[in-house]
Amino acid sequence: MPRFASTATPTPADLAAARDVTIPDLIAPGLRVLFCGINPGLWSGATGYHFAGPGNRFWPALHRSGFTPRLLHPDEPQELLALGLGITNVAPRTTAKADELSKEELRAGGIALRERVTQYRPRALAVLGLGAYRTAFGRPRTSVGRQEETLGDTEIWVLPNPSGLNAHYTIDGLAAEFRALREAVEGPRANTP
């Protein structure tokens, strides 16, 4: 539930008050893909919505990859669930930057994430952040893409972090990585942007 109207912009006081809060997972049994962020940012904590920061490229990458028929917004979580997609995080608490998380938090988050995946059994888990995956899963030499490791029947994918702070990937580069995942879980689709 949003902490204020979805059309409002969080004030500096709202963002300060959002530090170290949690927002609920967007999850259900049998999803096609469970997307896993590193942790929610302050904007997400203030609004109550995943990937809500104005510089975050998750929603545009999701749409450009063909996962969604239109550009969804953070305040439309039920639309995402209806498409068989969910969102969780490695670490639950909000921070201004992911580097505020300790390695211990990420490792503990990896254990909890494995338990969620075992319980909900999505077809694929997509961890959005190479460094977070390496730490949380103890795989220091992994790279972006499908991983050899699985969690039961759940494929594991590592995708680039869609944060606007990740300058290594353009929106088109992000969309291409997301598209590779989509095609693996549902097959190629004609006329994908």
Image (tube, helix red, strand yellow):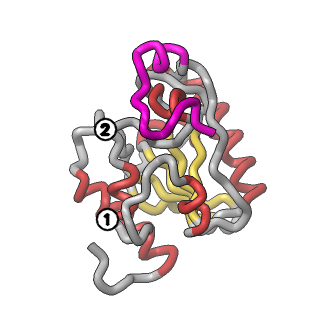
Residue 55, compared with residue 146, is above or below; it is above
Q: Could you tell me residue 128's position as x and y percent?
A: 45, 47
Residue 141 seen from this side: yes
Report x, y in % for residue 12.
Answer: 40, 15
Which mark sits nearer the N-terminus, 1 or 2? 2
Residue lying at 31% horizontally and 65% vertically, measured from the top left = 64
With 114 as the anchor, is 144 left or right in this view? left
**Principal SS element in the magenta part?**
loop
Q: Secondary structure at mark 1?
A: helix
Q: Position of residue 153 (x, y in %)?
A: 68, 68
Residue 54 is one of the magenta-drawn residues: no
Q: Which residues are magenta?
A: 1-17
Query: In percent of the image, x 64 and y 65: which residue is there?
Result: 31
Residue 10 lies in the magenta-colored region: yes
Outermost bottom residue: 190
The label number, if any, that marks residue 64 in the structure image: 1
Q: Which mark is residue 75?
A: none
Horizontal and vertical percent for residue 150? Answer: 61, 61
Is residue 134 visible in the rendered image? The answer is no
Kindly indicate the quadrant of the structure image that contains residue 24.
top right
Amino acid identity at mark 1: Arg
Density class for disc 2 (Cα within 10 Å; few <14, some 14-19, many ≥20) is few
Residue at screen point 39% across, 50% down: 58
Seen at 60% across and 67% down, the residue is 82
Q: Amino acid at mark 2?
A: Gly
Q: Which residue is identified by label 2? A: 55
**Mark pair 1, 2: CA separation:** 16 Å
Image height of 67 relative to 43, above or below: below
| Quadrant containing the C terminus in the rendered view | bottom left
